[in-house]
Image (cartoon, helix red, strand yellow):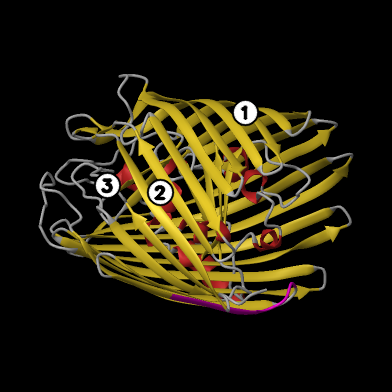
Amino acid sequence: MRPTSLALALALGLPALAGAQSTARQLDAVVVTATRSPDASLAPLAATTVLTREDIERSQAPDLIDLLARQAGVDVSRTGGPGSVSTLFLRGSNSNHTLVLIDGIRVNAAQQGLYDFANLPLERIERIEIVRGPRAALWGSDAIGGVIQIFTRDATARGVQLRAGSFERREAAAQWGFGDGERAFGIGAGLIDMEGYNASTPANFSFDPDKDGFRNRHLGLAGRTALDRQTLAGRALFTRADVEFDRGESEVRNRQLGATLAGPLADRWSHSLAVGHDRQDLLTRSSFGSRFDSRRASLDWVNDVALGRGQALLFGLNHSEEDATSKAASGSVVYDRSRRNTGLFLAWRGQAGGQSWDLAARLDDNSQFGSTTTAQAAWGFEWGQGWQARLGWGQGFRAPSTNELYSPGFGGFFAGNPALRPERSRNLEAGLGWQGGDSRVAFSAYRSRVADLIAFTGPLFQAVNVQQAELDGVELEGHTRLGRLAITGHLGWQRAENASTGAALLRRAPRKAALSLDLPLGETFSLGLDTTAAARRQDFDGPLGGYARVDLRAEARLGGGWVLRGRLENLLDRDYTLASGFATPGRSGLLELAWQPRS
């Protein structure tokens, strides 16, 4: 069945619209992405970061990529202001080495193999889970550096947000839902409009000293209903963005639809059956105009069987079909390609005394590249008052994207290569953590090797498989309180190199740090300070200088569910660059007035 026909069947069969992990929404303390299971008794043996709705609101981040940039193991690059192309590097891996899910639906675009975080508004997000390290044995292709799963707003969420800020920024969003644990329906919508600032610098070949604006419209729907012992849930997310850049403009449309039937099949056997559809259309109007259309339809069936004695068996299948089309500005078809992938996976997890383990294996059959097997194994040990040690090993792989295979490039530059082989990786990791009361600390060390790494290199920057990439690093995270002052931060060191040449992989900082201070002043007012620092890193035409940035936050609760928030970004007005030839904002401000009903 082609993606279009599966999407039509999905649309005709949906009594409600929703995502593939709805059962996990009632289990906020559970990290479902690391294990594909909502079993709270088995903690994930992986380096994870969880951002709740409360964390998102407290951060006052202007957009999703800015929020993710402050997380451990993450480097970001963006070509201008809000809405401009934004990429993310997890643990030094390539930007298309991170699998991105929205409510369980895979959203990595078929053409580029990555997801552009720039056009998903924070107002549509309830929770984010970041799992660092390969997860191919559970999720399949693309999960070499890790997995980021975004959960959209719950069906019962209510609230209003109004924002205004620098660069003539104006935002409005509202969410309204009703129901209970068994039946609920919600709708949310919003808009973002800003005049922006000049996205490029004079070093850019297309420099034009004008303002580059951004407009975004978004709509989310969610619903669920109980069917005897099962829960039928549905979600839909629509975004449309218009992004201006020097000498051009892009129109970006994203649509994700999904439905899930989940619940117990027997006393010790639960399941989740999910169908999903992802569509992404990118139209660029410029001297190098183009159109990219990406379609993917998917079916996931995950089964969780409790074996007793603290053990569980997880098994399931995944099937996806994707179409990728590339057109020139004239409308002529550059390529139109389809492929499908079927994966079967099995995992055994358990704990006994202070020990826990997690073993998983997967077989993928790809219509273009044949069969691939991946596996992972992890062991953990807890002792004393809150101490845990863990060891992990895992494999990953990624099938080349259609642009990497078939793109003619620009005058021969950045052209694809139909002879490319899939990338494969192996990873070793060790971790040590402690948690007690309001304090916690975690240390991770990892060593990854990526064989047949796809890179654009040579005189014309064409796609080739380089021999191997080496990714090594350590991460230190912590949180504590000194009286009423909350302190959260992380430090990271990494080495990301092409093993054949010793050259550093681009736009990845060898050292990075972030620190946040939160101080409540009475019952209604609080202050926050965020600092971020990154070391010098390499780009296409030379090094990007290191930088440090300081942001100031304040929040005042006005009563009746109203909250006033203010953020001053880049307080010291420092110059810094995330991508060569592209500008970043200087000192800027953002003011927010929000309301949500009190519990």
Q: Residues within 10 Å of mark 2 (few under 14, many from 20)?
A: many
Relative to 207, 163 lies left or right = right
The picture quadrant where one finds residue 358 is top right
- Pointer 3 or 2: first along the chain: 2
- Is residue 379 in sight in this rendering? no
Magenta segment main secondary structure: strand
Distance in Å between CA atoms under marks 2 and 1: 28 Å
Q: Which residues are magenta?
A: 173-181
- Taking the spot 49% from the left edge, 39% from the top edge, the residue there is 72
Marks 2,1: beta carbons within 8 A: no
Quadrant containing the C terminus is bottom right
Q: Amino acid at mark 3?
A: Ser
Query: Residue 81: horizontal and vertical position, in percent?
Result: 27, 57
Q: Residues within 10 Å of mark 1 (few under 14, many from 20)?
A: many
Relative to 200, 173 lies left or right = right
Query: Residue 206: horizontal and vertical position, in percent?
Result: 11, 52
The tag on residue 155 is: none
Distance in Å between CA atoms under marks 3 and 1: 41 Å
Q: Which residue is mark 2?
A: 114
Residue 324 drawn above or below residue 168: above
SS at badge 1 = strand
Viewer-side residue, 553 vs 270: 553
SS at badge 2 = loop
Q: Which residue is mark 3?
A: 407
Residue 149 drawn above or below residue 346: below
- Taking the spot 78% from the left edge, 74% from the top edge, the residue there is 227
- Taking the spot 77% from the left edge, 62% from the top edge, the residue there is 263
Q: Which residue is mark 1?
A: 431
SS at badge 3 = loop
Q: Residues within 10 Å of mark 3 (few under 14, many from 20)?
A: many
Q: Amino acid at mark 1?
A: Gly
- Pointer 2 or 1: first along the chain: 2
